[in-house]
């Protein structure tokens, strides 16, 4: 319940920051910004999010995940060349491990597969600086910000097969009964940070690269770090 309230408060903060930025932009205009950027812009974007679940426990291996996300963001001018951007996106991550074993004594083979899936909503809020490259249609946009992620669904599926039996079990990563202890149970809500740079071409095509990490744990001594490669369309 606290996580939902925190998520709602962050969303309200993003909306309030955007509203303030819009009000500031209507009262103070900067002549140094291009007309296409002075009032801000909207972006529809998609991302590739290779991520690492870093487990700070002796003997535990980190988990590499493949992620994809898509969403919408709005940038508002707050000062000369400075913008606040708030967005909303949906993210999917997964990880698969497969193990094969052969027992030559009995000429038997076995197969084990563990699949982890995570679906999340995220609200990124960034402070950006727009640098227009002289005599070109390219803008470079370094940024830094915070990100709130709410984990909608998280499952782990264990499959085992050999010549005699086949086992298939699924676990809810947010259910203490399924995970066995409170330390192993995942949390619904994480606050994180990100830093990166974007480039806009002709005020429409956008590409970006960023890195970020959780500030709060997704499980005990466990945090998620993410590299994001972004492709978007601005208007």
Image (spheres, grey):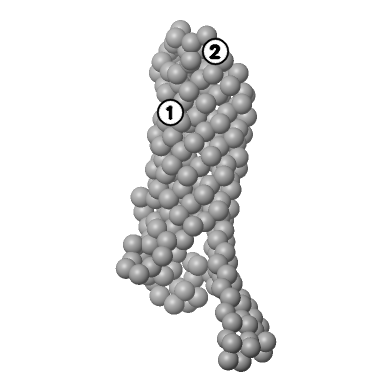
Quadrant hosting residue 165? bottom right
- Please determine whether, in this image, residue 95 is positioned above or below residue 211: below
User: Quick one: SS at disc 2?
Assistant: loop
Q: Can residue 113 be seen in this view?
A: yes
**Residue underneath mark 1:** 142
Question: Residue 199 appears at what percent x and percent y?
Answer: 52, 26
Q: In which quarter of the image is the C terminus?
A: top right
How many marks are shown on the rendered structure? 2
The residue at the point 47 percent across, 74 percent down is: 179
Q: Which residue lies furthest to the left in this view?
A: 58
Q: Quadrant of the N terminus?
A: bottom left
> In the image, 111: left or right of 17?
right
User: Quick one: SS at disc 1?
Assistant: strand
Q: Residue furthest right?
A: 163
Question: Residue 209 appears at what percent x and percent y?
Answer: 49, 36
Q: Can residue 83 be seen in this view?
A: no
Question: Residue 195 appears at what percent x and percent y?
Answer: 41, 37
- Please determine whether, in this image, residue 85 is positioned above or below residue 135: below
- Please determine whether, in this image, residue 226 is positioned above or below residue 129: below
Question: Residue 118 appears at what percent x and percent y?
Answer: 55, 58
- Please determine whether, in this image, residue 117 is positioned above or below residue 107: above
Is 175 in front, or is 199?
A: 199
Is 184 in front, or is 94?
A: 94
> In the image, 65: left or right of 2?
right
**Residue underneath mark 2:** 136
The residue at the point 33 percent across, 66 percent down is: 57
Is 75 in front, or is 137?
A: 137
Q: Residue furthest bottom?
A: 106
Which numbered dot is residue 92? none
Q: How many C-alpha atoms fall within 10 Å of the one at disc 1: few (<14), some, or many (≥20)? A: some
Q: Which of marks 1 and 2 is nearer the N terminus?
A: 2
């Amino acid at each position: 319940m606290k996580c939902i309230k925190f998520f709602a408060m962050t969303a309200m903060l993003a909306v309030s920051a955007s509203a303030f930025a819009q009000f500031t932009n209507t009262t103070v205009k900067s002549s140094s910004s291009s007309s296409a950027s002075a009032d801000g812009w909207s972006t529809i974007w998609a991302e590739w999010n290779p991520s690492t679940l870093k487990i700070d426990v002796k003997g535990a291996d980190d988990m590499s995940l493949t992620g994809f996300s898509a969403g919408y963001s709005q940038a508002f001018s707050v000062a000369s060349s400075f913008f606040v951007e708030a967005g909303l996106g949906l993210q999917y991550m997964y990880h698969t491990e497969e193990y094969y074993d052969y027992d030559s004594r009995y000429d038997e083979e076995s197969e084990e597969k563990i699949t982890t899936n995570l679906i999340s909503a995220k609200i990124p809020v960034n402070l950006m600086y727009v640098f227009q490259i002289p005599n070109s249609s390219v803008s470079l946009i370094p940024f830094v910000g915070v990100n709130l992620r709410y984990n909608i669904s998280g499952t782990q599926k264990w499959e085992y097969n050999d010549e005699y039996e086949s086992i298939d079990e699924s676990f809810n990563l947010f259910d203490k009964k399924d995970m066995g202890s409170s330390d192993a149970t995942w949390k619904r809500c994480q606050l994180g940070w990100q830093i990166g740079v974007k480039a806009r071409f002709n005020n429409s095509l956008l590409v970006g690269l960023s890195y970020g990490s959780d500030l709060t744990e997704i499980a005990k001594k466990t945090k998620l770090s993410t590299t994001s490669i972004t492709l978007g369309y601005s208007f």
